[in-house]
Amino acid sequence: MTLGLAVFLAGCATTDQTPKITIDPKLPKPQNIRVITTHNSAAFEWDLLNYSNLDGFYIYRSDKDGMMSRVASIKDRFTTHYQDQGLKSDSTYQYRFSSFSKDGMESDGSGVVVAKTQPPIEAVSFIANVDNLPNRAKIVWRPHPNPSIVSYVIQKSDVYRQKWEDIAVVKGRLQAEYIDKDVESGKTYYYRVVAKAFDDSLSYPSQSVEVKVKKLPIPVDSVYATKNIPKQIVITWEAPEQKEFAGFRLYRADKTDGTYKAIANTSEKKFVDRIDEDGAVRYYKVTVVDKDRLESPAMNIATGLTKPLPTTPKFSLATIKENKVVLAWTMDGGEYTYRITKKWGSFLNKNIITFKDIKELRFEDKDVDLGTSYTYSIEAVDKDGLASKMSDEVELFVPKGL
C-alpha cells in the first residue's frame, strides 16, 4: 500500500459516518478535479472514467478537526459533477474523491482538493428605527441592490446584544420594513437584518438599531370610595396631567379576590356607582387610557360601601302599668328616630297603627282597651331615612279591672 493511500485510509476509516472500505489499487480514481465555489457551496467536475467495472464515486470532506468523512455516494459511473451545499461562507474545506466497483471495492483516494467558499454577501447598507409605537417595534431598511436576494432574516437581541435570535423572514428583495408585536410597553429592543439569496446564502448582518416601545400612561395616584351614602358609592381619584390622554377606565369587583369588570369610561375624576342594596361592599380600581388605547396598570384599589341599615333595636322593657303599655329598648350609638308598629284584633279584622318620629328610647301607649292583647315591634330610622329591620314582636295583654 502506498504512503498516500495509508494516510487517506487513516483519515477515512476512523469516523462513524464512513464504513469500512477495501482498497483495490487497480481501480481508477477520479482525475483532473476542478472546483468552483459560491458563498455556501462547492461544485466539482472531473474527467469521465469510462470503465465498465466501475459503479460510481465516493466523496469525502474534512471536518473541523481535519478528519475525512463520506458526504456523498454517487451510484453512476458516468457522473462527472457534484455540488456540496450548506457550507459556511468564507471557509476552507478539503475533499478527496474515489471510485468504487460493483463488488464493493474502492480505489485509492485522489489528492486533496481544496475549496474555499466566497465571503458573505455585503450587508444591507442602511437600517433605521421607528420609536414610540404602541405595542410594537418597527424597523425599515434600504433594499439590497444584489438581484439574487429574495428575503431578509430579522434578528433580535436583548440590551447586551451578545446573542441574536432569528425571529422572522421578510420575503421579497424590495420589501423593506418589519413590525415586531412581541414586545412590552416601555422596553427597548435591538434589531438587525441579514439578506438571504435564492441559494440560501446569507449576507453580513446589518448594523443594529435600538427601538423603544411606547410607554404605558402614568397610573392614577390614589383612589377613594365612599362608605356612608345610601344606595350608591362615589369613587374619586387623583391622576397627573399627561400627554395623549384619552380618558379613565373604572373597574369593579364584588370580592377582594374577584374578577374586575370595566363599568365606566370617563374623562372626569369622579364616578357615582348606583347600587340598589344597603350595606353592599364593592372594590374599585382605575386606569388611564391614551389615544392609542394603551392602558396604564391599576396601582391602587379602593373599597366602597353603600350605607348599611341601622342595627335593629332590642326591647329591654315591655309591661302594663296603670292601664297603659310601657316600652323601652336599647340601641347602639348614633342618632335615630324610631317607629313603633302596634297590632291588635282578630286574624280577619286586624288593626295596625304606626307611631313615628319617636326620639326617646321609651314609649308609653295609653290608648289601650282592657281585656285586649296587643303586639308591638320597633324600627330605627337614620337621618337619611334608612330604616332598620323590624324587631321581634312583644305581646302584651291588658287585663280587666286594673
Image (spheres, rainbow, N blue to C red):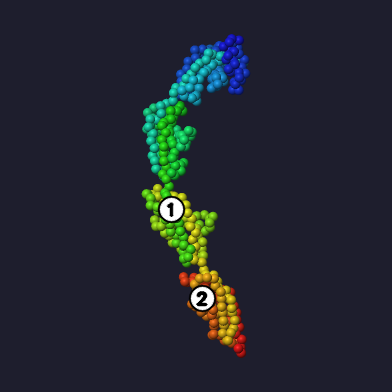
Q: Amino acid at mark 2?
A: Tyr
- Mark 1–mark 2 contact, CB under 8 Å? no
Q: Nearer the viewer, residue 31 or 219?
A: 219
Q: Nearer the viewer, residue 217 or 180?
A: 217
Residue 33: image x %, image y %?
Answer: 49, 14
Q: Is residue 398 above or below residue 381?
A: below
Q: Point out the image quarter for the N terminus.
A: top right
Residue drawn at (50%, 25%) of the image: 86
The disc placed on residue 220 is: 1
Residue 42: image x %, image y %?
Answer: 48, 21
Dot 2 crowding, Cα within 10 Å, few <14, some 14–19, many 20+: many
Residue drawn at (50%, 77%) of the image: 359
Dot 1 crowding, Cα within 10 Å, few <14, some 14–19, many 20+: many
Q: Looking at the image, can residue 255 be seen?
A: yes
Q: Looking at the image, can residue 345 be seen?
A: no
Q: Nearer the viewer, residue 34 or 190?
A: 190
Q: Earlier in the sequence, mark 1 or mark 2?
A: 1
SS at circle 2 = strand
Q: Amino acid at mark 1?
A: Val
The disc placed on residue 338 is: 2
Residue 54: image x %, image y %?
Answer: 57, 14
Residue drawn at (54%, 85%) of the image: 366
- Toward which corner of the image does residue 100 lie, by quadrant? top right
Image-based side of 158 in relation to 243, left or right? right
Q: Point out the image quarter for the C terminus.
A: bottom right
Residue 72: image x %, image y %?
Answer: 55, 21
- Alpha carbon distance from label 1 to label 2: 44 Å
